[in-house]
Image (tube, rainbow, N blue to C red):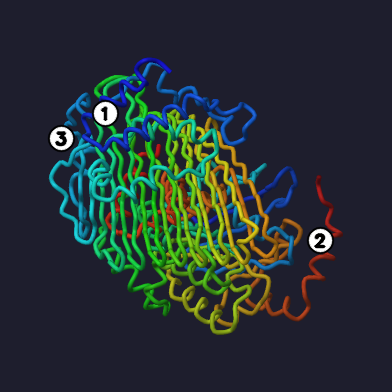
């Protein structure tokens, strides 16, 4: 193997407050690929995303997360971010009193490991605001404080664009958006596609896949990847729903 | 009371300050009052969480008459910083009760109290005699009334808009076990406006012995006056403070007040706003930055005596090390004060496991057509906020720092003077660990 895969999730078991949520997830994302991870509510999609980012509440009981060949287990979230992982949250946290400008500056400093000159920071921000059609006044608002659903998602995409991660995980970034906001978000994601980058798109609906064609689609049911396939799998899900996968899952013996 | 805290000291002060005889008489009356009043009863909710004997000057403290005060080292870093005028402000600085240079303020008359007592005796007399205190408050306030010095009378006549913010800097250099009694009276005339930054700094002369500060601040807003008042408390870490700070609002007056509490080992502050005229409004903001073994006890009173009045109050404390915050807040709405809106909030952010906070809201509402709300919280830094910031590459320590600064920011925003906002942000952030 010349290049290690961007992300390898190997037999990952995760529990939250003592309850097992992921029960052996296997997933590989290579550079240049877009993967869609679909699944019904409660299947463990968000758990996987929090786990990739290193949320302290999610305990890996066994298995591995390898990013560029390196085991992430011991790394705190900020070091995973500095390594190039980004998670766009489904429900981003509000941080009252902290402006987006200060926040982005601190984030860029953290990811780069050194201070970013004011002038360069302004240029980066301005270019990305323009590309996403966001007004400059946005920068002086407090992070997610009193934001509408659409504004929160836009801020996630802005952060992703500014930080330019190598692996982006987007957790239901498409949910709760009207069609215009959805297009903006999809464009933001498309703009990030590059041969050296990988994207893992977590979604409940097939809707956003009209704007973003995935290379691989995975179906997560009851804490396991029940099936993987090409883009056609998303259409099959749209037509038949998750019921067929649920049935398959119930006949599979589950080790407890 | 010992010999030290007797009429002998009053007479010596009177002589030094060359004040009219009636002012000295008021001092004597206050001392007599202090002697007859009991110490606060241990069952009193507003007092029992602080050992008030630590604020008793007769426990080995000596009066710091102006001539006994040490010279302030003007190159002391905090002094040097505060002596530098900020862009756009008018600065008047005092050193141990005298002007560092004669004040030249546009739109504002500033006099020492002994002079004001001669030029406007009726006004000053009324102010000095005003009461409305509880016995427990008066037990301490009467000491200031008896021994006050470094006292100022600041007046904006009616119909004057003071455009430039005024910063009044009080520098006190104190020897160990000295007690000082500053008094600042501010009256703003009908329809006038003023932004005043009232800054207090004490520099102890190299000792870990405590010094005592018993302060009184009175703000009087005549009808339709608009005042932004900022108090910067930067007492030395060995200071013990009792503060009585009162604002009285006539009809249509608007007050925005920010109390920034950064220093002292022990502080017991009573901050009251009294609404005597209709349509008066006040917005009170407080920030306490607790560190080391500081003990901060704040009591606020929103005293609505007139109808159609409005008050909003928000006291926030960020507590690190083994600091302790006690907050008791009373909203009082008189029967005649119908259609009043009053709000009170106290939020405590615990930055260390060893810090402590207590918060006690009190309501006394006699009117039946009012809106009144209070809220309080005591909580550590939110883990979800920290995680969110860390997920963007911000290391834990920097993430927590951002959250704390975000917590403080709404209070800093209330300071109507950007250069001071920036200075405070840097100062607070620099003291976080």
Q: Residue A121, labelled with which disc? A: none
Circles 1 and 2 on the same chain: no
Q: CA distance from mark 1 to mark 2?
A: 90 Å
Circles 3 and 2 on the same chain: no
Residue B291 seen from this side: no
> Looking at the image, is mark 3 or mark 2 nearer the viewer?
3
Judging by the rendered image, the residue that carries numbered circle 1 is B13
Which residue is the extreme one toward the left? B101
Relative to the observer, which residue lies in front, B36 or A126? B36
Which subunit holds the residue at mark 2? Answer: A
- Mark 1 closeness class: few <14, some 14–19, many ≥20 residues within 10 Å: many
Q: Is residue B417 left or right of residue B85?
A: right
**Residue B350: % across, % down:** 53, 40
Q: Is residue B320 left or right of residue B378?
A: left
Which subunit holds the residue at mark 3? Answer: B
Q: Residue at x 56, y 56 (%)?
A: B304
Q: Residue at x 39, y 61 (%)?
A: B222
The secondary element bearing badge 2 is classed as helix
Judging by the rendered image, the residue that carries numbered circle 3 is B75
Circles 1 and 3 on the same chain: yes
Q: Residue A249, labelled with which disc? A: 2
**Residue A111: % across, % down:** 39, 53
């Amino acid at each position: 193997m010349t290049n290690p895969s961007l992300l390898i999730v190997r037999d990952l078991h995760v529990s939250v407050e003592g309850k097992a949520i992921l029960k052996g997830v296997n997933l590989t994302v290579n550079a240049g690929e877009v993967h869609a991870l679909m699944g019904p509510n409660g299947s463990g999609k968000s758990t996987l995303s929090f786990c990739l980012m290193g949320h302290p509440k999610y305990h890996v009981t066994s298995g591995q997360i390898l990013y560029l060949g390196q085991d992430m287990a011991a790394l705190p979230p900020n070091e995973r971010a500095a390594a190039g992982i980004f998670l766009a949250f489904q429900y981003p946290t509000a941080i009252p009193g902290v402006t987006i400008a200060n926040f982005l500056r601190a984030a860029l400093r953290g990811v780069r490991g050194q201070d970013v000159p004011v002038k360069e920071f302004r240029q980066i921000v301005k270019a990305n605001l323009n590309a996403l059609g966001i007004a400059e006044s946005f920068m002086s608002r407090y992070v997610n404080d009193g934001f509408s659903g659409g504004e929160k998602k836009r801020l996630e995409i802005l952060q992703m664009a500014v930080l330019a991660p190598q692996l982006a995980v987007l957790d239901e970034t498409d949910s709760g958006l009207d069609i215009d906001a959805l297009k903006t978000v999809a464009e933001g994601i498309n703009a990030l596609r590059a041969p050296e980058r990988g994207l893992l798109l977590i979604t409940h609906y097939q809707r956003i896949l009209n704007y973003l064609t995935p290379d691989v689609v995975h179906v997560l049911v009851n804490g396991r990847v029940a099936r993987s396939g090409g883009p056609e799998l998303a259409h099959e899900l749209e037509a038949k729903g998750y019921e067929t996968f649920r049935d398959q899952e119930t006949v599979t013996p589950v080790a407890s | 009371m010992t010999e030290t805290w007797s009429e002998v000291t009053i007479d010596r002060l009177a002589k030094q300050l060359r004040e009219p005889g009636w002012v000295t008489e008021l001092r004597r009356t206050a001392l007599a009052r202090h002697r007859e009043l009991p110490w606060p009863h241990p069952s009193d909710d507003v007092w029992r969480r602080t050992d008030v004997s630590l604020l008793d000057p007769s426990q080995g403290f000596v009066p710091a008459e102006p001539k006994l005060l040490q010279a302030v080292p003007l190159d002391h870093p905090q002094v040097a910083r505060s002596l530098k005028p900020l862009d756009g402000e008018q600065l008047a600085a005092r050193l141990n009760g005298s002007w560092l240079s004669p004040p030249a303020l546009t739109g504002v008359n500033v006099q020492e109290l002994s002079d004001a007592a001669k030029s406007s005796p009726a006004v000053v007399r009324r102010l000095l005699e005003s009461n409305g205190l509880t016995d427990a408050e008066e037990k301490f306030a009467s000491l200031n009334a008896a021994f006050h010095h470094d006292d100022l009378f600041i007046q904006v006549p009616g119909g004057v808009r003071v455009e430039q913010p005024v910063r009044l800097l009080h520098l006190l250099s104190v020897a160990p076990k000295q007690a000082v009694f500053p008094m600042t009276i501010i009256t703003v005339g009908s329809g006038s406006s003023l932004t005043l930054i009232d800054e207090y700094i004490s520099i102890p002369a190299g000792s870990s012995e405590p010094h005592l500060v018993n302060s009184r601040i009175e703000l009087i807003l005549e009808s339709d006056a608009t005042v932004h008042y900022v108090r910067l408390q930067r007492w030395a870490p060995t200071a013990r403070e009792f503060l009585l700070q009162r604002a009285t609002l006539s009809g249509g007056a608007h007050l925005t007040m920010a109390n920034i509490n950064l220093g002292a080992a022990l502080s017991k502050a009573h901050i009251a706003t009294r609404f005597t005229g209709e349509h008066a409004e006040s917005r009170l903001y407080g920030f306490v930055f607790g560190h080391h073994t500081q003990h901060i006890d704040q009591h606020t009173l929103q005293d609505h005596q007139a109808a159609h009045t409005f008050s909003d109050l928000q006291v926030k404390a960020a507590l690190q090390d083994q600091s302790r915050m006690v907050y008791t807040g009373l909203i009082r709405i008189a029967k005649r004060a119908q259609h009043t809106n009053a709000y009170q909030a106290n939020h405590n952010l615990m930055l260390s496991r060893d810090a402590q906070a207590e918060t006690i809201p009190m309501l006394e509402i006699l009117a039946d057509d009012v809106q009144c709300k209070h809220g309080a919280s005591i909580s550590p830094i939110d883990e979800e906020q920290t995680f969110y910031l860390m997920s963007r590459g911000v290391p834990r320590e920097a993430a927590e720092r951002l959250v704390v600064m975000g917590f403080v920011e709404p209070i800093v925003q209330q300071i109507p003077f950007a250069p001071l906002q920036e200075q405070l942000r840097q100062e607070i952030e620099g003291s976080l660990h």
